Image (cartoon, helix red, strand yellow):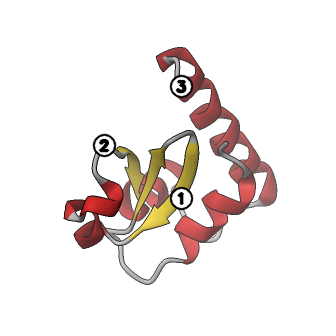
Amino acid sequence: MIDEAVVHELLDATDDDAALVLLGGTAQVVDRTALGSDAFRGAAVLLSRAELVDRLGTSSPTQEDVARVAASLRDAVGKLGA
């Protein structure tokens, strides 16, 4: 569901408004403007790139920090029953 690769993908996004979303049990990074499209109707926005960088305190975190964020996000989503 949410792994380190998708966290890295969000960090690598060029737009701070890019968002990590969950749709149909799949986590993906999308441009915020795409969220209004039919393709992403019902998607749960987990966090934006800007929020992730703020949470990490850097746009170049260690692999350990990325793993910790991915685990935290998996845990939070699991508690929501997604």
Residue 36, label in figure:
none
Q: Residue at x 55, y 69 (%)?
A: 11
Q: Is residue 32 left or right of residue 25?
A: left
Callout 3: SS: helix
Earlier-in-chain disc, 2 versus 1: 1
Residue 47 makes an appearance in the image: yes
Earlier-in-chain disc, 2 versus 3: 2
Q: What separation in Å lies between label 2 and label 1 (alpha carbons)?
A: 13 Å
Q: Furthest-left residue in view?
A: 36
Disc 2 marks a residue whose amino acid type is Gly
Q: Residue at x 47, y 45 (%)?
A: 22
Q: Is residue 77 left or right of residue 65?
A: left
Above or below, 6 against 81 in this view is: below
Q: Foreground: 14 or 61? A: 14
Q: Furthest-bottom residue in view?
A: 14
Q: What separation in Å lies between label 1 and label 3 (alpha carbons)?
A: 16 Å
In the rendered image, which residue does mark 2 sit on?
A: 42
Q: Residues within 10 Å of mark 1 (few under 14, many from 20)?
A: some
Residue 61 makes an appearance in the image: no
Earlier-in-chain disc, 1 versus 3: 1
Q: What separation in Å lies between label 2 and label 3 (alpha carbons)?
A: 18 Å
Callout 1: SS: strand
Disc 1 marks a residue whose amino acid type is Gln
> How far across and how far down the image is residue 78, in percent?
59, 22
> How far across and how far down the image is residue 49, in percent?
42, 63
Above or below, 55 against 30 in this view is: above
In the rendered image, which residue does mark 3 sit on?
A: 76
Disc 3 marks a residue whose amino acid type is Ala
In the rendered image, which residue does mark 1 sit on?
A: 28
> How far across and how far down the image is residue 9, in percent?
61, 69
Say which of marks 2 and 3 sits in front: 2
Say which of marks 1 and 3 sits in front: 1
